[in-house]
Amino acid sequence: MVKLNVSKELIDKIADQQNDKYLKSTHNLICKIMGETLKDLSSKTSFVSMDNVVFQPANELVSGAFIDGSVFTYLLGVQNVQLEINTSRSASFWKNLKDRLTFAWDNRKTFIRKKKHKKRKKDKNKELGINEEKFKIDPLKYTINDLAEDAQKTIINYLSETSLVYLNKNLLQIIGKDDFGSNTQIFIYVVNYDGVYFKQFAGKKKGFINIDIDSRIDSLTKKIDEVGDNFIKILKIFNSLYFNTNGNMCNQVFLESILCSCPDDLFEGDEIYKVFLKLINHISIISLKDIKSINNPNLTIFKDEVCGNCILNFNKMLSRVLSK
């Protein structure tokens, strides 16, 4: 076996890291805030109802292999045919940018101050002039990015004044020390949903990228049933090593696909360092190009766009770990 450039103590420490209480409390708070936000949105636009939305945890939240560098990432899937049609034929980037800048300027006061307490919501909304009336919507032009923008305007009513909500196309990024604690980041992707796939629009040329959460969960559940808790411990270890090598998290579908492809017997053992040693050596000598994606078993991890493009950083992590 190749000598590793990481200590047994470090591997054991990563594997034994416990954050279940923090995960549960933060997740429950996010769900509560989004529940109120969706109720509010459903009263302002026919595109959203409490029956046609799915709030789905993504990234490390699916497996539970959450580490200190992880972000609370969710998919807000909206099942509405007209919204999907509008999104697929959405306007150009520059027109959307111009519209967003115009809106931001016209409603700049909205994003400077937010309400302090729910009991003051009515007066605050009257002052801002955006929340008591339905959004002005063209049913033939309203896209998933427009919905994300309206979600941004709505969710601020359920956060403290110190929280920030950034918008980048269909991505909401929430940072709120007073609401969620230090170093907690929340990403919410507002996407289309057809009852099976969460559909991320990647532009007119590429169309929609289908995210099959059920396929991913089935693959993870099957592997964990076969090899036990060591799978999650190993996933945490790889996440931590990748993050500390590259400064960002590895695409979880990419990494989970690699680990799910590994023989079950490599996960056996009571000492997690020895288990990790077997797996890292196995992965370092096999070809990754034929590994199937757990998001779409018909595609490899290099052809499935849901797996991202992190092979270079993954190899960088392997090289660092395996260096003598």
Image (cartoon, rainbow, N blue to C red):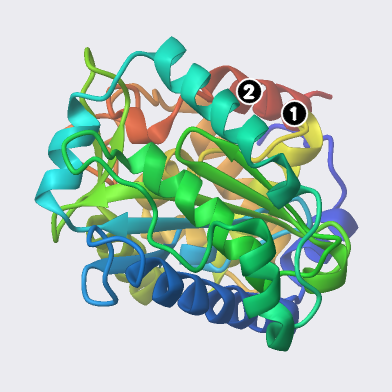
Q: Amino acid at mark 1?
A: Asn
Q: Is residue 305 above or below residue 31?
A: above
Q: Give 233 or 41, whichever is nearer the viewer.
A: 41
Residue 313 image label: 2
| Residue 241: percent from left, percent from top | 74, 42
Left or right: 25 as drawn, with respect to 250: right
Left or right: 9 as drawn, with respect to 57: right
Crowd around label 1: few <14 · some 14–19 · many ≥20 (10 Å): few
For this orientation, the residue located farthest to the bottom is 119
Tags 2 and 1 in contact by the CB under 8 Å rule?
yes
Q: Is residue 189 above or below residue 39?
A: above
Provide the residue designation for mark 1: 246
Q: In percent of the image, x 19 and y 29: which residue is there? A: 88
Crowd around label 2: few <14 · some 14–19 · many ≥20 (10 Å): some
Question: Mark 2 or 1 closer to N-term?
Answer: 1
Whether residue 27 is visible: yes
Q: Quadrant of the C terminus?
A: top right
Q: Amino acid at mark 2?
A: Asn
* SS for dot 1: helix
